[in-house]
Image (cartoon, rainbow, N blue to C red):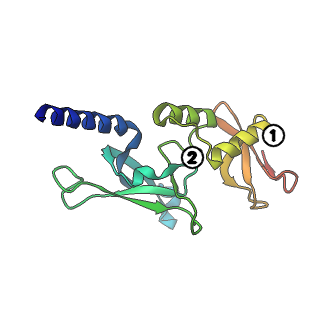
Amino acid sequence: PGRDLLGARVRLCFKALRRLPTNAMAVTATLANDHDRGPAHASAGAQTTTVSYERLGLALFPLAAMVNHACRPNAVCRFSFGTGGGGLGGEPPQVRIVPVEDIPAGGQIFISYGVVAARLGLEDRRRLLAGHYRFSCRCTACCEEEECHAKTPGWEPSEFQCPRCGAHRLLQRAAQGSVVAMRCSGAGACQGRQD
């Protein structure tokens, strides 16, 4: 009987370890650095703030692990640490899911699993998500991009709204890693273009 109990515990540990890669969250600390923008902006007292994230490790948050992914999320994870100094010998970190836009009552909350539309193209995002999390992303951003590729080859959706009509996203055309043209995605409604 003792051996069976030990075997059951070992199996349970391995089962938990297999879940770690897809359910663990990268715990990060937010670092903000203020930079003086130089003498040309001194009269206005202008400064810029650079925000970066330092990865501290992985943690399991069972409820947060149930939140679905979107490449253009409507919420982000924020971590807080107890008085023990970042969880090293102190209290473990806690996660809060914070909305970054209005979410209607009953609407679904989405976070990013590390890949967002603003940083990676459709195929790269899908490849990374399929490889690590074992699913093919069909979020709104991916579906919009897929539709855009079919309707307007060579153009990709950007993260910007059209300044002319305010109703549609701007499409962008890139060459050698730089955006060379933008236009409104509204089919005939606006067609604002910025070259």
Q: Residue at x 20, y 57 (%)?
A: 91
Local packing at callout 1 (Cα closer than 10 Å; few below 14, some 14-19, many 20+) is few
Task: Give the residue at the far front of this rendering.
Answer: 1
Task: Give the residue at the far left of this rendering.
Answer: 2
The answer to whether 8 is drawn above or below residue 88 in the figure is: above
In depth, the one of 29 and 82 nearer the eye is 82
Quadrant position of the N terminus in the picture: top left
Numbered circle sitting on residue 163: none
Work out whether residue 36 can be spotted.
no
Query: Percent position (x, y) of residue 152?
Result: 80, 39
Mark 2: amino acid: Cys
Residue highlighted by disc 2:
71
The answer to whether 32 is drawn above or below residue 130 in the figure is: below
Determine whether, in the image, residue 125 is placed left or right of residue 85: right
Mark 1: amino acid: Lys
Work out whether residue 62 can be spotted.
yes
Query: Percent position (x, y) of residue 45?
Result: 47, 65
Residue highlighted by disc 1:
151
N-terminal label among 1 and 2: 2
In depth, the one of 131 and 98 nearer the eye is 131
Q: Residue at x 15, y 51 (%)?
A: 89
Q: Residue at x 55, y 45 (%)?
A: 116
Determine whether, in the image, residue 128 is placed left or right of residue 90: right
Tell me the SS state at disc 2. Answer: loop
Task: Give the residue at the far bottom of this rendering.
Answer: 105
Q: Are marks 1 and 2 in contact (CB under 8 Å)?
A: no
Tell me the SS state at disc 1. Answer: helix
Determine whether, in the image, residue 61 is placed left or right of residue 127: left
